[in-house]
Image: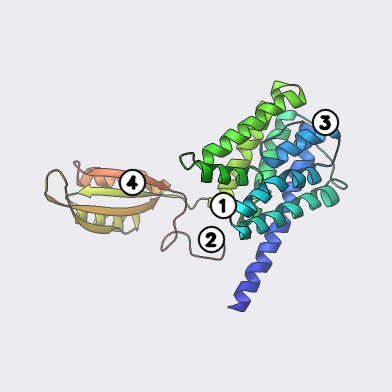
Amino acid sequence: MGRIIKRGMVRDVALLLAGAVVYGIGTHCFVTPADIAPGGAMGIALMISHLTGLPVGILTLLTNIPPLILAWFYLSRRFTVRTAVACAVCSLILDMAIAPVFPVYVGDRLLSSLYGGIVIGVGMALVFLAGSTTGGTDIVGYLMQKKYPHVSIGRALLIIDGVILFASIFVFGNVDAGLFGLICLYAQTKVIDAIIYGNDGGSQVTVVTGQPQLIAQRVIEELDRTATIIPSKGAYSGKDTTILLCTVRKSEFSRLKRIISECDGDAFVMVTESSQVFGLGFKDFGPDI
């Protein structure tokens, strides 16, 4: 058990350092010269740096201090410590290892926004996989959701990042700053989702049918999948019926839909998208979950 824990810690440290390096490259080489602020504490730091000329890394760390203090009192202290360490590592690597060595891209502003978002997204995903976070609006979003439970974290983050993007228009003196910042933010979000969730998504299909055995048999034979059959009763009709549960990859869903329609045209089907599926026929349980 001790060896497993030690290997996990080494893995987390390696992921954090790698993520910090990639994050710093995306910020210094692409985002900073493009004069954009793609949300988060980094976005605030980039605007302050534009006005004062101070290093982006140390400004990002200073910007994260107030949310971290609030997180210490109102959120998990373990979460706060891990986030503080990640913020410090990312900031120090950006100012001390990346900025003095790596050149900046001075080409097209749109390409800077796009590639900056991609590279930063890769870095943030590695930090997330290490069990940490880069702080900033993530903390504020959690705090807002705790105070206003009816507001989802996603909506809270959207509001905060929207305010930062809007402010960047006035700080950098042009509307393009907000538009390019939005492109950068969108790109990094998509890259983070792609790395963390990958192609492990699937479709969970719930079928209320009178032909469960026939559908299950064809699923086994034609899709090389299996299904779960659950006896049930209709609330309105009071009649006995059957629910069949089946999970397939997204590429297999159209074939499953055809099988259901051919076996029971009166079936009632509900489809739920699953970001990750673990188990036989899908992704194995491993140390990265």
- Left or right of 275 on screen, residue 163: right
Disc nearer the start of the sequence (3/2)? 3
Disc nearer the start of the sequence (2/4)? 4
Read off the residue under disc 3: 51
Mark 1 belongs to which amino acid?
Answer: Ile
Disc nearer the start of the sequence (4/3)? 3
Residue at horizontal 75 percent and vertical 53 percent from the top: 88
Q: Position of residue 147 (x, y in %)?
A: 52, 43
Disc nearer the start of the sequence (2/1)? 1
Read off the residue under disc 2: 289
Mark 3 belongs to which amino acid?
Answer: Leu
Foreground label between 1 and 3: 3
Foreground label between 3 and 2: 3
Q: Which mark is residue 196?
A: 1
Q: Position of residue 7 (x, y in %)?
A: 64, 71
Res. 106 visible in picture: no
Real-space CA distance between mark 3 and mark 2, rounded to the nearest whole angstrom: 41 Å
Asked if the residue under mark 3 is in contact with the one under mark 4, i.e. CB atoms within 8 Å, the reply is no
